[in-house]
Image (spheres, rainbow, N blue to C red):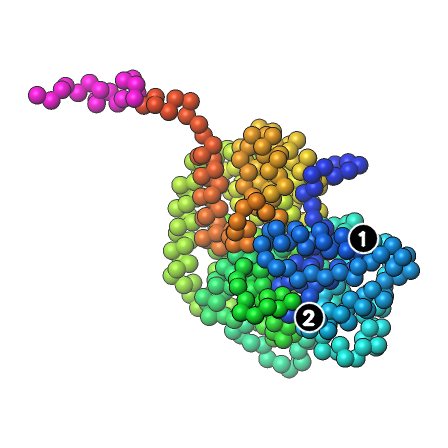
C-alpha cells in the first residue's frame, strides 16, 4: 500500500499541478452553447486561455469578470452582473458557468447571493442557466475543479423525474473524468453505442474540443452535450462513471434521481475493459459484439509480445491522481516497476499503487526521484527534466503543447490499451543501443553449422 506524502517545500519548482478553476472551466466546455467565466482578475483567465489554446490548438471560449484591486476589496457583484449581462447580449449562451478563483475566495464573495440578485434584477435572462462552482486555486487541483463542476451541473441542471416516471431501458449516462481526452470519450461513446444503447455524456468534450471545423462561427462552445439532454439524464437506466474523481457526481445523480451507477477507476488494461463489456452486455441484453472479442484477443497478444520489453523497466510518472493510477496500475501489470510517482492532490486510488510512497509535489520532485529510471511520463513541462536525466519522455496529460494531436490520444478500451503498450514498448526498444552494431559479421558470431559448411563445388 502506497503512502501519500507531501514535500512541504516553501515554493513550487517547475509546477506539475494546474488549478481548480482551470479544471472547472474545461468541464463547462463540454456543454453545448456554454460560456465559462472565471470570477477573478484578467490574468487568471489569460493563463487558462493560453494553456488550453496551446494544448487543443482550437478557439477557446473563456471569459472573466476582470476584478481590479478596488473591486476585489469592495466586492465583485457589479463585475459579475456586468459580465453576465454582456455575455448574454453578445454570445447568447444557453449556459454561463462561473468558477471562482483564489482572489475572490479570499475576499469571500457570495456568488450564490450574487446570482439570486442578478435573477431578480434581470428577468430577461431567465432562459439562460447560471451555474456557480467554488474552485479556489490555493487548494486542491485540476481534477478536483472538474469533479466539483460536474457534480454541480448534475445537481442544478438535471431534472428530478416524477416517482411514477418509467426509465428508458435503452439509455445510459457517461460521466468521464478529466484525465480522459476527447479521443478517449469518443471511443467510449462508440463502445456503448455498439451495444444498441443511447448515451448522454457529461461533460462531452469529444464534441467540443475534438478539433473539427464548424459550419458557422459561434462565440460559445462549438459542440458538446445539449442542455436539454442534460436535464433528462435522470431518466436513464444506469450511469457509468470513469475515474474516482467522478464518484461525487455519480452519487449526486443517484441521490437526486435514483439512477444507479457503476464506477470504473480506470479503463486502461484488460480486466477493467472486460468488466465494462460485461456491464454493457447485462444492461443491453445483447452479447458482446464480435469486433470487441477480436480486439480483446489482439490486446492479449500485444501483452504477450510486450512483456519482453516492459519487464523490470523502471517508470517515473507525474500526473493527476486518476491518470497516475490508470497508467501506473496497467504498467505494473505488465511487469514494470513504478519507481517514482508524483501527483497533485489526494485521492483514495493512490494508496493502491505498487510503490512505497506517492508524493504530492512538483516536477522537481519527480526529477529527483526519476534518476536511474527507463522512462519518464508526464506532460510537456517535463521535457527539460527528461533532457537533464537523459530519459525518454512519454507526454501524457495536460498540457501537451510541443506535439500535435494531444486531443486524440487514446488509452481506453482494448485498442487504446494495446496502442499504449506498443508506444511504450517502442520507446524501450528504441532506447537500446548496440555498442557493436556490426558484431554479427564477425566469424565467431556466425552459427557454427553455417560457418563450418564446406564450400560448394
Given residues 120 and 250, the one toward you in this image is: 120
> In which quadrant of the rendered view does residue 72 lie?
bottom right
> In which quadrant of the rendered view does residue 116 lie?
bottom right
How far from the left and from the top, in percent, is residue 33? 64, 70
Left or right position of 10 against 292: right
Numbered badge on residue 102: 1
Disc 2: CA contacts within 10 A as few (<14), some (14-19) or many (>=20): some
Q: Is residue 70 magenta?
A: no
Q: Secondary structure at mark 2?
A: helix
Disc 1: CA contacts within 10 A as few (<14), some (14-19) or many (>=20): many
| Vertical arrangement, residue 39 with respect to residue 163, above or below | above
Query: Magenta stretch?
Result: 441-457
How far from the left and from the top, in percent, is residue 257? 67, 72
Q: For the C terminus, which image quadrant? A: top left
Q: Which residue is mark 2?
A: 91
What residue sits 67% from the left and 52% below the top?
50
What residue sits 54% from the left and 59% below the top?
211
| Vertical arrangement, residue 251 with respect to residue 364, above or below | below
Amino acid at each position: 500500500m502506497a503512502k501519500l506524502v507531501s514535500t512541504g517545500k516553501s515554493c513550487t519548482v517547475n509546477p506539475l499541478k494546474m488549478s481548480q478553476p482551470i479544471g472547472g472551466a474545461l468541464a463547462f466546455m463540454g456543454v453545448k452553447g456554454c460560456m465559462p467565466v472565471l470570477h477573478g482578475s484578467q490574468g487568471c483567465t489569460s493563463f487558462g486561455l493560453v494553456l488550453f489554446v496551446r494544448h487543443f490548438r482550437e478557439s477557446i471560449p473563456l471569459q472573466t469578470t476582470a476584478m481590479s484591486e478596488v473591486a476585489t476589496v469592495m466586492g465583485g457583484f457589479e463585475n459579475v452582473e456586468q459580465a453576465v449581462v454582456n455575455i448574454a447580449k453578445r454570445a447568447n449562451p444557453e449556459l454561463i458557468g462561473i468558477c471562482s478563483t483564489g482572489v475572490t475566495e479570499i475576499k469571500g464573495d457570495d456568488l450564490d447571493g450574487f446570482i439570486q440578485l442578478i435573477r431578480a434584477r434581470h428577468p430577461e435572462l431567465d432562459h439562460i442557466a447560471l451555474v456557480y462552482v467554488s474552485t479556489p486555486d490555493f487548494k486542491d487541483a485540476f481534477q478536483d475543479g472538474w469533479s466539483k463542476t460536474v457534480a454541480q451541473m448534475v445537481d442544478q441542471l438535471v431534472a428530478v423525474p416524477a416517482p411514477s416516471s418509467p426509465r428508458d431501458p435503452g439509455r445510459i449516462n457517461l460521466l468521464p473524468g478529466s484525465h480522459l481526452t476527447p479521443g478517449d470519450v469518443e471511443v467510449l461513446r462508440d463502445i456503448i453505442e455498439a451495444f444498441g444503447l443511447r448515451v448522454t455524456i457529461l461533460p462531452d468534450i469529444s464534441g467540443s474540443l475534438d478539433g473539427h471545423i464548424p459550419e458557422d462561427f459561434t462565440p460559445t462552445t462549438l459542440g458538446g452535450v445539449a442542455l436539454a439532454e442534460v436535464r433528462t439524464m435522470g431518466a436513464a437506466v444506469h450511469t457509468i462513471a470513469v475515474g474516482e474523481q467522478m464518484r461525487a457526481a455519480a452519487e449526486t445523480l443517484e441521490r437526486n434521481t435514483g439512477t444507479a451507477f457503476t464506477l470504473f477507476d480506470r479503463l486502461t488494461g484488460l480486466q477493467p475493459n472486460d468488466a465494462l463489456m460485461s456491464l454493457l452486455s447485462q444492461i443491453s441484453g445483447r452479447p458482446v459484439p464480435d469486433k470487441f472479442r477480436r480486439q480483446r484477443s489482439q490486446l492479449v497478444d500485444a501483452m504477450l509480445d510486450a512483456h519482453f520489453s516492459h519487464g523490470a523497466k523502471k517508470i517515473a510518472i507525474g500526473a493527476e491522481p486518476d491518470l497516475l493510477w490508470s497508467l501506473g496500475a496497467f504498467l505494473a501489470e505488465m511487469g514494470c516497476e513504478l519507481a517514482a510517482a508524483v501527483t497533485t492532490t489526494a485521492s483514495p486510488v493512490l494508496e493502491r499503487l505498487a510503490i512505497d510512497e506517492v508524493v504530492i509535489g512538483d516536477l522537481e520532485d519527480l526529477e529527483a526521484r526519476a534518476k536511474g529510471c527507463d522512462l519518464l511520463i508526464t506532460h510537456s513541462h517535463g521535457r527539460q527534466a527528461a533532457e537533464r536525466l537523459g530519459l525518454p519522455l512519454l507526454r501524457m496529460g495536460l498540457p501537451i503543447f510541443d506535439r500535435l494531436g494531444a486531443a486524440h490520444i487514446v488509452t481506453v478500451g482494448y485498442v487504446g490499451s494495446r496502442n499504449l503498450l506498443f508506444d511504450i514498448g517502442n520507446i524501450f526498444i528504441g532506447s537500446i543501443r548496440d555498442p557493436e552494431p556490426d558484431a554479427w559479421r564477425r566469424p565467431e558470431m556466425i552459427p557454427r553449422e553455417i560457418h563450418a559448411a564446406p564450400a560448394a563445388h
